Image (cartoon, grey):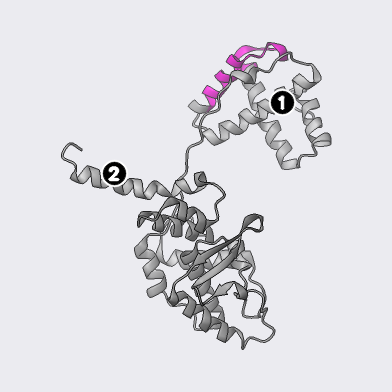
Amino acid sequence: MPVAHPQLQSFLDYLKFEKRYSRHTLVSYENDLTGFFDFLELQFGSVALPEITHTFVRSWLAALKDGGLTAKSINRKISALRSFFKYQLKTGAVAQSPMGRVVAPKNEKRLPQFVADKDIDTLFSYVEFPDTFRGRTERLALLLLYQTGMRLAELIGLRESAVNASNGSLKVLGKGNKERIIPVSDTLLAEIKTYLIEKATVAGADRTVLLVSEKGKLLAPRSVYTFVKKYLSLVTTIEKRSPHVLRHTFATHLTGAGAELNAVKELLGHSSLAATQVYTHNTIEKLKNIHKNFHPKA
């Protein structure tokens, strides 16, 4: 099927045959670029490629913003235009790109959702988990996610040998095969010990990893996601109820209680402090409330 604007065809062919982009990515590029050239034609009539300046691009972006498009979506469209004009420079169709003077809007920072302290207390103190090996596996998985902040993949791959009862810690294998040590409470260690005793009675249970299904197999990511969502739905109304939300909750509760950001960074296994700084939002909100309530000039 021919594209709406002939000047797009060679670029889309380049993405398809040389860059070997997926069908989904190609459709995204075509839609974004078609939107720009539709706007150009409607507002300014027929404009040749070399005549397109940053003013045309800015007019389109302003229209998108006025239409309620988010900064993230606008930036994706800017990225598509940059790639398009970079290709046109390469082929000699234009002498310079109009994108050099186009400034991308800053993406809105989405604060991570987390489960409130009282709801976490309800989850582990009042929610009844099934009195089965599966129920105990699910409860321990939730405890580990909340009390260590580990990622879903780290939980599933957590080894029995990672448990160090003598110094009260777990050794977690994170992204890029980087190991980190996470301290855990005596109470959690006792829960793990009790679980391992029962696990030893499960026929053919995988003894390399800590958590297994009732059939003794490695936990599937989808099944963990499903039961985490099920239990969180019983105690909280937040929109996201996933394993990663418990990681956010771990970090938010730590920073809210006054933990140093560098320490939280190490516990989470972040490569840079920038990734951890998002968790200061709760602390800042607390400080704002204190200032508002107690400062005489607030």
Q: The residue tagged with tag 1: helix, strand or loop?
A: helix
Residue type at the position of mark 2: Lys
Q: Which residues are magenta?
A: 41-64
Q: Is residue 161 left or right of residue 260?
A: right
Majority secondary structure of magenta residues = helix
> Comparing marks 2 and 1, which lies closer to the viewer?
2
The one of 104 and 210 positioned closer to us in this rendering: 210
Is tag 2's residue or tag 1's residue first in the polypeptide sequence?
A: 1
Query: Label 2: few (<14), some or many (≥20) within 10 Å?
Result: few
Please tell me whether residue 224 is drawn above or below residue 25 in the rendered image. below
Residue at position x 81%, y 31% in the image: 14
Please tell me whether residue 5 is drawn above or below residue 172 in the rendered image. above
Query: Label 1: few (<14), some or many (≥20) within 10 Å?
Result: some
- The residue where tag 1 is placed is 84
- The residue where tag 2 is placed is 288
Q: The residue tagged with tag 2: helix, strand or loop?
A: helix
Residue at position x 37%, y 59% in the image: 116
